[in-house]
Amino acid sequence: MSTQDLDPMERLLAERACERLIVEFVHRLDLGDPSSVADLFTPDGVWLWPHGDRRVEGRDALRGYFGSRPKDRLSRRISTNILVTVSSASAATATSYLATYRVDGYTGGMVQPRLPANVGHYEDTFRKVEGTWLLAARSTHLPFGGETERLRHPGES
């Protein structure tokens, strides 16, 4: 089946499902249970960071990776410019831009504004598995990035 054979409504629903995964990903990392991000991937899903050759493959490894983030981390991610391309009834790709605001050592309250820790884009591959769209691969590209700042609290040196 070529993309020309897709019903316009089927294409629209596929695009929306993939967009939803992109938004759900950052929501779970920032406001939910980070380890549950693994459930958004196919069983053999892959998370790639070409810079530094980081590769995490499979749901168990992804669950461990995302679940290991520091408990005192405060983060907010912004995803925008989401462009989904549906290539068949069960395959799609997307590019989306990201900005990540992140600090460690968070104990509550409001944090003074700061520049984002990372700015870049994701390149995603999606697969429809048993009627559900999932991430098959996510590659992170960060032309702007830095270390996570650790907040200092009164009395700390």
Image: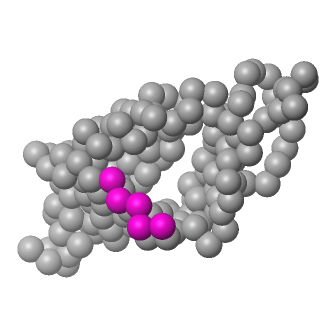
Image location of residue 154, percent across then percent down: 90, 23
Residue 6 within the magenta-colored segment of the rendering: no
Image-quadrant location for residue 95: bottom left
**On screen, residue 98 above or below 111:** below
Q: Residue at x 36, y 33 (%)?
A: 36
**Residue 81 visible at all:** no
Q: Residue at x 56, y 32 (%)?
A: 70
Q: Quadrant of the N terminus?
A: bottom left
Image location of residue 128, percent across then percent down: 18, 54
Q: Tell me: 87 left or right of 74.
A: left
Q: Residue furthest right?
A: 154
User: Which segment did they paint magenta?
Assistant: 52-56
Q: Residue furthest front?
A: 157
Colour scheme shown: one colour
Q: Nearer the viewer, residue 151 or 35?
A: 151
Q: Nearer the viewer, residue 115 or 49?
A: 49
